[in-house]
Image (tube, rainbow, N blue to C red):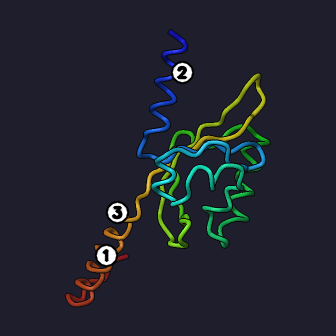
Amino acid sequence: MLKWNEKLCKKIVENSNEGIIFSDREGIIRLWNRGAELIFGYTAEEALGKMLDIIIPDKHRARHWEGYMRVMREGSTRYANEMLSVPAIRKDGKRISIEFSVIIIRENDRIDGVAAIIRDVTSRWEKEKEMKQYIATLEDKLGIKTA
């Protein structure tokens, strides 16, 4: 039964449209599924063994690594129970918006790294931005002031 469960879990991870990434304590990518390939444009062969920096925009790296190392030290994160929305960068340089939750992976009370379940929300974010701009334009035309 255990072998069947392992095969099933492997198939789910490999074939998910959500990006599933695991990075070790140092932030080196050790797992990169098909969903991550679709979202970020890197094949698993290109991403494995690389730092997470390949998907983090330059101006966000310091903040990312500060939080990442805090999680490695403290062993907890609020993003285990809620989604984090951040910008990311694809292989082609295109900036995208992603949401993800994290799972801290432990063995014998030692943190091995972090798994992230990732969704590309760029189109939704762009639609929301357009809607906000449209509402602001209407408010200007109608002389409505909002706080």
Determine the image quadrant of residue 106: top right
* Label 1 packing within 10 angstroms: few (<14), some (14-19), many (20+): few
- Residue drawn at (67%, 43%) of the image: 30
**Quick one: which residue is furthest to the left in this view?**
142
Whether residue 134 sits left or right of residue 28 in the image: it is: left
| Residue 53: image tag | none
- In the rendered image, residue 51, in percent from the top left (x then y), is placed at 71, 56
Can you say whether 54 is above or below 68 in the image?
Answer: below
User: What amino acid is labelled 2 in the image?
Assistant: Glu
Secondary structure of the residue carrying numbered label 2? helix
Work out how far the residue at label 1 is from the one at label 3, CA to CA, in angstroms: 10 Å
Mark 2 crowd level (few <14, some 14–19, many ≥20, 10 Å Cα): few
**Spot occupied by residue 65 in the image (x, y as percentages of width and height):** 73, 57
Task: Mark 2 or mark 1: name the one nearer the start of the chain.
Answer: 2
Amino acid type, residue under disc 3 in the picture? Arg
Q: Is residue 44 left or right of residue 138?
A: right
Residue on which the image places disc 3 = 124
Reading the image, the residue beneath label 2 is 6
At 55% from the left and 64% from the top, the residue drawn is 88
Which amino acid is tagged 1? Glu
What residue is pinned by disc 1?
A: 130
Q: Are marks 3 and 2 in contact (CB under 8 Å)?
A: no
